[in-house]
Image (cartoon, rainbow, N blue to C red):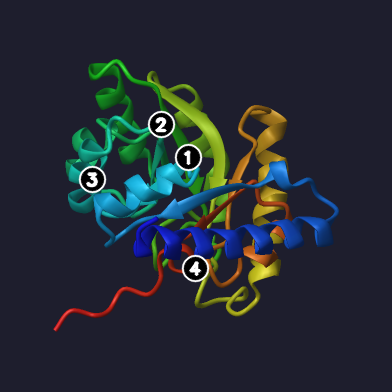
Amino acid sequence: MTDRKGELAANLAQVEERITAACVAAGRKREEVTLIVVTKTYPASDVRLLSELGVRHVAENRDQDAAPKAAACSDLPLAWHFVGQLQTNKVRSVVGYADLVQSVDRSKLVTALSKEAERQEREVGCLIQVALDAGTSERGERGGVAPGGVEELAGRIASAPGLRLDGLMTVAPLAGEYAGRQQAAFERLMDLSTDLRRDHPAANMVSAGMSADLEEAVAAGATHVRVGTAVLGVRPRLG
């Protein structure tokens, strides 16, 4: 085993222990929570090692990094998640490899994704990114639609050809009433998920929690956690 593979294996084991302990504390089964490893800034060689170690879900937040990496790893049994803010001029590229886009937050993006998914004859899963730091109709600092806009956007995704409404995603906000209150933020997302599932019962995915707050996300009921640093380490700054 290479040094890097050993390092990743040890990190994965620690994250697995954390998720398992959080599930036990919350009275949940371990299989209720899926780990997505966020591989941004790390090379395709790391993705290949992660696959060898049993990882099946990976995420990227920049198309310019993701597209070549996904192409280099196209032979691997991986589901690719796009988790960053997505501009419409990147949609054609992202639809080419992403199985799921977790950052859908406006109607214009739904239209572009649907058109491209149809053109490429693909079905793309969509999560609505909810901005818990937004006002009633604003967008959040890091993208996302305000809670009041979820219902309308869900309807647009559900009726859009080539798209599948899978659920909700959030990033713990740095400002507003939920700043520093990660578990409360994730519990709010779960309430919104309950509302969403009344009209869209299959949209039961809830993506919340990262390296620093995955326990709070599991406690709140998240189905997916997005972990980067705790698995891959802190990449040294360039320069």
Circles 4 and 2 in contact, beta carbons < 8 Å: no
Q: Nearer the viewer, mark 3 or mark 2?
A: 2
What whole-number distance in Å separates the C-alpha atoms at marks 1 and 3? 15 Å
Q: Which mark is residue 56?
A: 1
Q: Nearer the viewer, residue 12 or 31?
A: 12
Q: Earlier in the sequence, mark 4 or mark 2?
A: 2
Callout 2 amino acid: Pro
Q: Are marks 4 and 1 in contact (CB under 8 Å)?
A: no
73 left or right of 132?
left
Of 103 and 57, nearer the camera is 57
Position of the N terminus, as image quadrant, is: bottom left
Q: Tags 3 and 2 in contact by the CB under 8 Å rule? A: no
Q: Check disc 3 and report the residue beneath it.
A: 69
Which residue matches tag 2?
A: 77
**Is residue 211 found left or right of 95 in the rendered image?**
right
Q: Earlier in the sequence, mark 1 or mark 3?
A: 1
For the question of whether residue 55 can be seen, the reply is yes
Mark 2 surroundings: few (<14), some (14-19) or many (≥20) residues within 10 A: few
How far is mark 4 from mark 2, CA to CA?
Answer: 22 Å
Name the amino acid, label 3: Lys
Mark 1–mark 2 Cα distance, whole angstroms, equals 7 Å
Q: Amino acid at mark 1?
A: Arg
Query: Residue drawn 78% across and 45% down?
Result: 29
Residue 219 appears in the rendering: no
Question: Dot 3, how many residues are within 10 Å of its Cα: few (below 14), some (14-19), or many (20+)?
Answer: many
From the top left corner, tell me how far across and down residue 104 is, in percent.
41, 44
Quickly name the residue at label 4: 230
Residue at position x 52%, y 64% from top? Answer: 10
Q: Secondary structure at mark 1?
A: loop
